Image (cartoon, grey):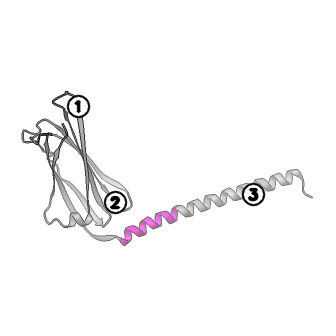
Amino acid sequence: MITVKNLFIAKNQWQKLFLSFIIILLFNTCDLLSNDSDNKCKETEQPSFEKSLSPAVYIKNKNGKSYWGAHVEINIYKEYCDGTIKGTFIKKATTLEDGYANFAYVFTYKFANLEDKVNYTITVTGEDPLTGDTKEYKYSDSMGYEETAEYAVNPIFLHHILKVPW
């Protein structure tokens, strides 16, 4: 005989069963997604090599003249095929009379996949000579496996001449 109490218990059991089914489905979906990422990385594997990168940054003002006394920061990191980020470094320098920012540092990374890349952002902070306000200029770039492998020299100089708008 079906009573109200039996119906409540049956409904409660169905809810637990449904919730268990959803949890199992979510775990399997996560496995599928991680396997896709692993497979993608396996498909693009390449012979590994190490490359050193050395920033060589010159700063010019809006008139194209060397910018002396600008504060320059480089934020550099390795992004692996699966999106993992490691090897983050932040280094700072002040430009010399010729506008050169000497970081006196070499960053070394291992490349082993077509999708591996090193990303970097150079931030220049300085004073606007007209207003006296502190201004900031950012430049971002990256180097991937193929581009890095083309260079026979080690280290590779990340040579940039950046012209700030003040």
Magenta span includes 58: no
> Horizontal and vertical percent for residue 127?
18, 32
Crowd rating for badge 1 (residues with CA inside 10 Å; few <14, some 14–19, many 20+): few
Quick check: marks 3 and 1 in contact, CB under 8 Å? no
Looking at the image, the residue that sits furthest to the left is 97
Q: Secondary structure at mark 2?
A: loop
Q: Secondary structure at mark 3?
A: helix
> Horizontal and vertical percent for residue 7?
84, 54
User: What amino acid type is highlighted by mark number 2?
Assistant: Tyr
Question: From mark 1 to mark 2, how far is it between C-alphas?
Answer: 35 Å
The disc label shown at residue 80, or none: 2
User: What amino acid type is highlighted by mark number 1?
Assistant: Thr
Q: Which residue is mark 1?
A: 134
Crowd rating for badge 3 (residues with CA inside 10 Å; few <14, some 14–19, many 20+): few
Magenta span includes 40: yes
User: What amino acid type is highlighted by mark number 3?
Assistant: Trp
The disc label shown at residue 14, or none: 3
Picture residue at 22% right of the left edge, 42% below the top: 73
**How would you classify the magenta stretch by its main secondary structure?**
helix
Left or right: residue 38 compared with residue 130? right
- Of the numbered discs 3 and 2, the one sitting upstream in the chain is 3
Question: From mark 3 to mark 2, how far is it between C-alphas?
Answer: 44 Å
Residue 18 can be seen in this image: yes
**Magenta span of residues:** 30-43
> Horizontal and vertical percent for residue 164?
18, 41
**Foreground: disc 1 or disc 2:** 1
Left or right: residue 58 compared with residue 141? left
Picture residue at 7% right of the left edge, 38% below the top: 97
